[in-house]
Amino acid sequence: MATHVITGAGSGIGAEVARRLLDRGDTLYLLARNAGRAKELAARFEGARTLVGDLAEPGRLSWAFEHQALPEEVDSLLHIAGVVELGTVGESTPKLWQATLAANLMAPAELTRLLLPQLRRSRGHVVFANSGAGLRANPEWSAYAASKHGLKALADALRGEEGGNGVRVSSVYPGRTATPMQEKVHRQEGKDYEPARYIPAEAVATSILTALDLPRGAEITDLSVRPGG
């Protein structure tokens, strides 16, 4: 039985990953932004444990964790949460940039730092649910794409630093996926949302678990997921 720490379990890809890991009997620690959200997650995923920490405020994660019981070992840290706000470079304010980088890049870096002792102890695995935007940037996606390009850099550096400690690091780059975030993006774009046109969240979850379940001695470093017929 493995122990996993998961961000973004409230919906979409993260919820599907959490459900599957719980169904196979693993121990889950689900990160929630506040106590109310933690209560909701605990009710939804019976048997899962929760940690409270707001990814929008990465500088406070260390303080938050000092007041909670962390797992002694972490077999996987799954960074699935993320935020997106579209806007041209000319329209995007420092507030938008700071919020995007805090949640999508700085918080994963800090959460990884705080849990590295447990990951090293178990020779664990860090999986970053990145995005196709982590490999290319399109108009009006500058802040989000920059945060995801940075997340790739974080993963690549971490892999080089922690490989000797037995810690594996994988990045998964899904294209547009049928999730509540995608619905929000369509509202920002002023377009109708048709979930059937996009990658099912279940498919991306399978990709993440494929990387996670690869036998030791091998490592999926970068995995792109695209819509298919």
Image: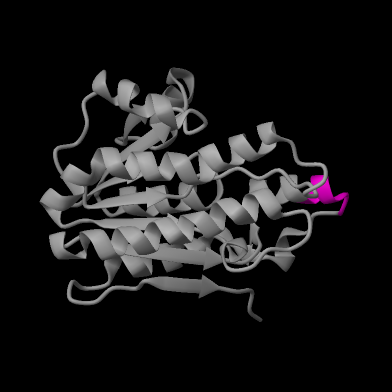
Q: Is residue 179 left or right of residue 51?
A: right
| Residue 101 image position (x, y, % from top left) | 56, 42
| Residue 88 image position (x, y, % from top left) | 80, 49
| Residue 213 image position (x, y, % from top left) | 28, 67
**Which residue appears at 41% of the width and 56% of the height?**
154
Q: Is residue 170 left or right of residue 134?
A: left
| Residue 192 image position (x, y, % from top left) | 86, 54
| Vertical relation: 206 (above or below) 49 | below
User: Does the magenta stretch mainly form a helix, a strand or a loop?
Assistant: helix
Q: Is residue 107 magenta?
A: no
| Vertical relation: 107 (above or below) 22 | above
Closer to us: 188 or 107: 107
**Which residue appears at 60% of the width and 66% of the height?**
132
Q: Is residue 94 left or right of residue 75?
A: right
Which quarter of the figure has residue 149? bottom right
- Does residue 43 appear in the picture of this structure? no
**Which residue appears at 14% of the width and 59% of the height?**
165
Q: Is residue 187 magenta?
A: yes
**Which residue appears at 55% of the width and 45% of the height?**
82
Identify the magenta region. Answer: 186-191
Closer to us: 107 or 33: 107
Which quarter of the figure has residue 138? bottom right
Q: Is residue 102 left or right of residue 20?
A: right
